Image: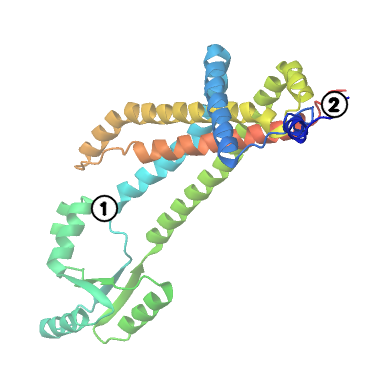
Amino acid sequence: MKQPTPNVKKNTRRQAPETRPQRSAGAVTARTGVSDRWHSWLGHHREMAVESLRRFFATPLASAMTALVIAIALALPAALQLGLVNFQRAVAGWDGQPQISVFLHKSAREAAVRSYTEGLRADPAIVEVTYISPEGALAEFQEASGLGDALAGLDANPLPAVLLLRPRNTDSGELEALAEKLRDSALTDAVVLDMAWVQRLAQLTELGRRLSAGLALLLALGVLLVVVNTIRLHIENRREEILVVKLVGATDAFVRRPFLYSGLCYGFFGGLLAWLLVAGGVALLSGPVAGLSSSYGSGYVLHGPGFPYLLGLTAGAALLGLVGAWLAVARHIRAIEPR
């Protein structure tokens, strides 16, 4: 037989098929980047917010009743707090500083009284000194008491000259020390420190502030209970849906998200209704208050809730709704597990 030539062998080696690495069969694991997860998280939040609004307006009667209960609970402390603000504005024009009345001896000479008055005006502890002559004091008393005819028949003026002092410092200890210093003067017959009404006004304002804070805390607890009960009913109505999404691997955070947005909706619209209730109450009372103040010669008008008040009330109510929804979800979502 004829032997194959070396060239044929070389060609045979060249035509031999090359061996390639085989790919492994099976599932391929795909890694999700941080950006993809972030966009997915934002997209789900946006979707749940829109879905919560849709569910809120899908049952307008039930949603409006719940929001109205929240609004009434929030409007009471809000109206009380606004009333305190208006009260402080009303008394802001009054003389809120304590006053010291110095009654001089009737036998004091006019030159000595003038010198004593100038010395008090130069005292850095005193802001203002007002001198009322005996004749001026008598005229003022006649006008205030209505006994003008009876006092006109007196042979002599029984009232002394008076100095009205406005101290710079309102500390009670320093006021007492200043009053004691004034009593030591030879021209002074009596010194009256008039600050009792100032203390009563401050105590009344503090009482109203604490009452408003206590009522706000109590009714905020009531708002939380209303939201908790409402979200609990929502969870029970969607129990089957929660079981299904948990069966396919949904986390508790995924499940609780729509209920948190529902709580935000209830709180926000409840705060908005509360602001409308307070604004309506101010509008109803503005006319009578303006008429009453004009009868006393004052141009005072009620100060209504403005935009910052609206922002604070709706934000606080939305936060209460969110907290109430979180409490309801944290308690009931964990109890719903597929078997």
Q: Determine whether, in the image, residue 121 is placed left or right of residue 220.
A: left
Q: Nearer the viewer, mark 1 or mark 2?
A: 2
| Residue 190 in which image quadrant | bottom left
Residue 133 x/y as whole percent: 14, 70
Q: Is residue 167 visible?
A: yes
Q: Amino acid at mark 1?
A: Gly
- Extreme left residue here? 111
Residue 236 x/y as whole percent: 74, 19
Residue sitting at x 25%, y 34%: 290
Residue 145: which numbered mark, if any?
A: none
Q: Amino acid at mark 2?
A: Lys
Q: Quick one: 81 or 69, which is closer to the camera?
A: 69
| Residue 202 in which image quadrant | bottom left
Q: Residues within 10 Å of mark 2 (few under 14, many from 20)?
A: few
Say which quadrant the N terminus sits in: top right
The relative height of residue 315 versus residue 137 in the rendered view (above or below) is above
Residue 2: which numbered mark, if any?
A: 2
Q: How many marks?
A: 2
Q: Determine whether, in the image, residue 335 is placed left or right of residue 303.
A: right
Q: Determine whether, in the image, residue 239 is placed left or right of residue 321.
A: right
Q: Secondary structure at mark 1?
A: helix
Q: Quick one: 306 or 32, which is closer to the camera?
A: 32
Residue sitting at x 17%, y 53%: 143
Instruction: Of the two numbered discs 1 and 2 on the same chain, state the one appearing first in sequence.
Output: 2
Residue 247 x/y as whole percent: 79, 23
| Residue corresponding to mark 1 | 93
Q: Quick one: 174 or 309, which is closer to the camera?
A: 309
Residue sitting at x 58%, y 32%: 40
The relative height of residue 260 versus residue 159 in the rendered view (above or below) is above
Q: Determine whether, in the image, residue 123 is placed left or right of residue 236.
A: left
Q: Secondary structure at mark 2?
A: loop
Q: CA distance from mark 1 to mark 2?
A: 132 Å
